[in-house]
Image (cartoon, rainbow, N blue to C red):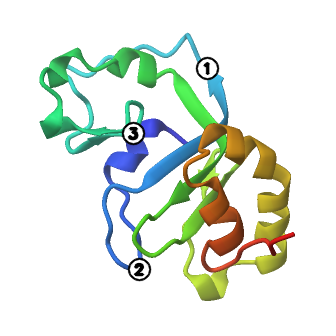
Amino acid sequence: MKYRLMDVLACPYDKTFPLRLIAIKRTEHPERQYTWPRKPFCEEYCSYRDLKIKEHPKPEALPCEECHRWEIETGVIYCPTCGRWYPIIEEIPRMLPDELRNEKEELAFLQNIAEDLKKAAPDIADKILTQGRPFALKKP
């Protein structure tokens, strides 16, 4: 998944924007070149720097060239309003309605990334792991 996708994603349940992106594993592609004629590429939200474009004093100075080279392989998209989390698995964000999500697979995913999530996002990792919706790990 590319960072710039977060500029258009909102929570399907409560329409919260922006959502929080937590990159667990990412891959750099130095061969990718930024070729768009304008900067910044994103219109509302830069998830690479976790900021709203309009709040940045010099949006044209944002590192679009650098951002464009990264692909998020594994991560979590989190809605701070409703507490829902969505996995990013093999570069694909899986933002499905609760009734279409696979509880067993997603709990295994959470278990596998738990330690990395705590390192990448210590401020919200526990919320996702133990209170996240629609599934969460049981507290020890």
The N terminus lies in which quarter of the figure? top right
Residue bearing the label numbered 2: 13
Measured in 3D between alpha carbons, the distance from the residue under mark 2 to the one under mark 3, in whole angstroms, is 20 Å
For the point 22% across and 27% down, the residue is 40
Residue bearing the label numbered 1: 28
Q: Is residue 76 left or right of residue 66?
A: right
For the point 72% across and 73% down, the residue is 136
Among the 4 quarters of the image, the one containing residue 60? top left
Q: Nearer the viewer, residue 53 or 32?
A: 53
Q: Nearer the viewer, residue 123 or 90?
A: 123
Which residue type does callout 3 highlight?
Answer: Ser
- Callout 1 touching callout 3 (CB < 8 Å): no
Q: Is residue 49 left or right of residue 85?
A: left
First reached walking from the N terminus: tag 2 or tag 3: 2
Which residue type does callout 1 highlight?
Answer: Glu
Q: Nearer the viewer, residue 26 or 50?
A: 50
Secondary element type, mark 3: loop
Return the x and y of residue 46 as percentages of the image width and height. 32, 37
Residue at the farthest bottom position: 99
Q: Nearer the viewer, mark 2 or mark 1?
A: 2
Q: Is residue 114 visible?
A: yes
Secondary element type, mark 1: strand
Q: Nearer the viewer, residue 59 or 132?
A: 132
Return the x and y of residue 21 as percentages of the image width and height. 50, 47
Return the x and y of residue 16 as percentages of the image width and height. 32, 67
Return the x and y of residue 137 as percentages of the image width and height. 78, 71
Name the disc covering residue 47, or none. 3
Residue at the farthest front position: 140
Secondary element type, mark 2: loop
